[in-house]
Amino acid sequence: MSATTQRIAHGYDSNGAALQLGAVVHDGTVDPQARVRIPLAMLNRHGLIAGATGTGKTKTLQLMAEQLSAAGVAVFAPDIKGDLSGLVVAGESNDKIAQRISDTGDSTWMPTAYPTQFFALGGVGTGTPLRATVTSFGSILLSKVLGLNDTQESALSLIFHWADKNGLALLDLADLRAVIGYLTSDEGSKELKQLGGVAKSTAGVILREISELAAQGAEDFFGEPELDTADLLRVSDGDCPGRGIINLLELADLQNRPALFSTFLMWLLADLYEELPEVGDLDKPKLVFFFDEAHLLFHDASPAFLDAVSQTVRLVRSKAIGVFFVTQRPSDVPDDVLAQLGNRVQHALRAYTPADADALRKTVRTYPITEDYELEQALTQLGTGEAVVTVLSEQGAPTPVAWCRMPAPRSLMAPAPADVVQAAINGSVLHAKYAQEIDRESAYERLSAKVHGTAENDPPETAAAPTRTPGRNERAREIKPEPSIVEQIVASGAFKSFLRSAGSAIGRRMFGTASRRR
């Protein structure tokens, strides 16, 4: 090693387990002995993977996911173009891979497949259906999806509060429409006045936005069985015992539902925070969460939403969760969030416009001072599969800035064959758990019974029944048997109130989400 590469590599020395990001490049020469690493213990300090289209961000994600799985750490990542599905298939060597092995000193490279779980939102697409209830999603996250202003968001929060106070489960969009319809009726508005009113014009806007969301296919997403986020922390016990399972969420229809997709990822993160115990700093995280197309989450977001995101990212690290935002430019991420990302993998940036040049200069200012590279120039000259890196050392200090050439992933660097993916889905234990949709009694049924005077101990009402707009793929609701004594107790308002009080007050305060009912 040259004196410069030796000094840079020394900053990445690690006594514990670490991810191998590649080898140091200096003066146009790569030194395979000068290794760039991220300590596993520092991954819960979060990170950023950024770069222009085609610079290798997805392959970096794939490389990190492979090593995390091999270290027994579970991974969650959205798979926007299907490229990450290749993780389930062993890769193939070729001349380019052989050259990359030589450049990076990755002498142990061999084709490897990794245990992979495939999900799809609501079952629309290829994967195990992944759903959430409207109640657990919460008013703040739903307001972001619906594009509501501050007044409308406050009204929606009040509607959620009233439903929660009255023990009305909001499982799907039909339940939410039923509650809004009831609260804007003569009878319902009297009940709501005790907490504050909701103008009919505001309710009308919310209902129209809900209908538009339903038309985009959200009816398929909201419902039960709801994902238990603990299922994302699994470790394989099959052919690859001890390896962390890589959970991939198909987002092939991203362009049609960007707000729903990005906000759902935020719900997952918030739910993980609320459900997992405090563990502090461990030798390695329980889960590393990759948040691809992160700019979609922050686009047109309210200050309250951004504050909640920042707080969640800051607090979730104590639950042994690491979060990596993946986007084109660091400026896509708000400063309050960016300040919490201790690990940086910056692929090439383009400076074709004045705005691009300004973003480039801002990116350079976020790096530690270095005399080894002219960063503004280096960031425009990086090759595919190369990045400018700085991470946190085991002592929690920033490492020297390193131009890094990354090794090749060991799994297939292309979409996996459809039959292989389908076989993995069918063989998953989670597919049996989540494949069949459940439709139990909720707010829609209870309010319909109330206004028609058929609910137990409720006098007949004169208000019209809540209007229900059928979903795109809606199935007829089954007639439910009379609940048992135990079911009546569990469904009672007092029992639900007890569960609510036992939940995480911080989690509910951040996003207006409800504690999971188990």
Image: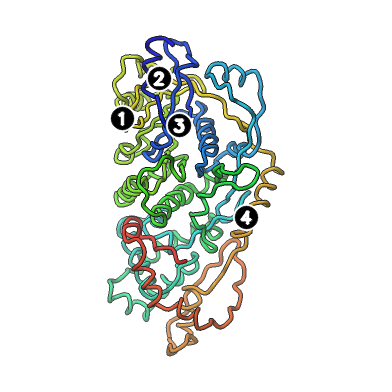
Of the residues shown, which amino acid type is indicated by label 1?
A: Ala
Depth check: give the residue in front, 153 or 5: 5
Of the residues shown, which amino acid type is indicated by label 2?
A: Ala
Q: Position of residue 461 (x, y in %)?
A: 43, 86
Rendered image coloring scheme: rainbow
Q: Earlier in the sequence, mark 4 or mark 3?
A: 3
Residue at the spot of label 2: 9
Q: Position of residue 139 (x, y in %)?
A: 38, 60
> SS of the residue at dot 1?
loop
Task: Please give left or right for residue 127 compared with residue 29 in the image.
Answer: right
Of the residues shown, which amino acid type is indicated by label 3?
A: Ala
The crowd level at tag 4 (other Cα within 10 Å; few <14, some 14-19, many 20+) is few
Q: Earlier in the sequence, mark 1 or mark 3?
A: 3
**464 lies above or below 170:** below
Q: Earlier in the sequence, mark 2 or mark 1?
A: 2
Residue at the spot of label 4: 429
Of the residues shown, which amino acid type is indicated by label 4?
A: Val
From mark 2 to mark 1, how far is it between C-alphas? 15 Å
Q: Position of residue 227 (x, y in %)?
A: 52, 57
> SS of the residue at dot 2?
helix
The crowd level at tag 1 (other Cα within 10 Å; few <14, some 14-19, many 20+) is few
> SS of the residue at dot 4?
helix
